[in-house]
Image (cartoon, helix red, strand yellow):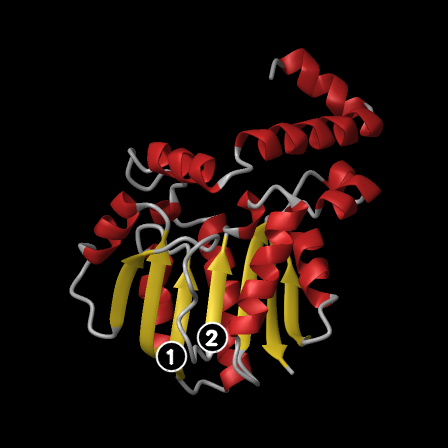
Amino acid sequence: MTNSVRRLLGKIPLLRSLYGFGLSFRQSLALGSGKSMGRYLDDLFQTPDPWNYAEGGETWQRFETALGLLKQAKQNELFECAFEIGCAEGIFTEKLAPLCTRLLSADICRSAVERAQNRRAWTNVNFMVWDLRSSPIPENMQLILLMDVLELFFRRRDLRKAKDKLVNAMPRRGFLLLCNSRQIRSFENTLWSKWLIRGGKRISEFFARDPRLEVIASETSDLCVTTLFRRK
């Protein structure tokens, strides 16, 4: 995007909103299938730490927010069994593991999983290559956690299938934590983003409408929306 286009978008909210709609539509075409998503992530992880998680900053703020919600929910007791979907290279896994007796961490990208396994000598963590679209969810997980995963589900039907799969796998009184990046505000607040279910705000609202779930806590920052649900 050129500087002149950025300036124009900055001046006219409607254009920013249309730009967000067009970008989301293009992404839905490009990454609508599981194979496309897998290729995208494989290409992305050819470079170690492609999202610069290790640098800290705002990314680590979302980590601390997620950990704070989990600690509050369990009153500092450990989660007996937890399942982390989208572990990438294990940077957040290191922070999550002390809250769990046993943690199973998974990612669709094999190279990312291999780096996570080699990150350190793990004591209570196992890793596997796993795809939310096609792989079965392990049973009896007291906590299921997804960070920066569901925003890659660009088609409504795919996100709906993912939601039902996750909720169906939750045991009674089990927890589900979602952390998803926000969209540009002029697009996030439109009916388009609600219909497309784009961005952390809309994804959280979509899950909250499921009658099987109750919202335990939710925090919204300029960067993301983090919501902890419990199965009724």
Q: Could you tell me how many numbered marks the image carries? A: 2
The answer to whether 158 is drawn above or below residue 165 in the figure is: above
Location of the N terminus by quadrant is top right
Tags 2 and 1 touching, CB below 8 Å: yes
- Residue at image position (79%, 45%) is 189
SS for dot 2: strand
Residue 191, how many percent across, how many down? 83, 43
- Residue at image position (22%, 50%) is 114
Q: Dot 2, how many residues are within 10 Å of its Cα: few (below 14), some (14-19), or many (20+)? A: many
SS for dot 1: strand
Which kind of residue does numbered mark 2 sit on?
Answer: Leu
Q: Which mark is residue 143?
A: 2
Residues at marks 2 and 1, CA–CA distance in whole angstroms: 7 Å
- Residue at image position (28%, 39%) is 48
Quarter holding residue 207: bottom right
Residue 217, how many percent across, how many down? 64, 73
Which residue is label 1 attached to?
A: 81
Location of the C terminus by quadrant is bottom right
Q: Nearer the viewer, residue 88 or 209?
A: 209
On screen, residue 80 versus residue 75, left or right, reads left
Which kind of residue does numbered mark 1 sit on?
Answer: Cys
The answer to whether 68 is drawn above or below residue 181 in the figure is: below
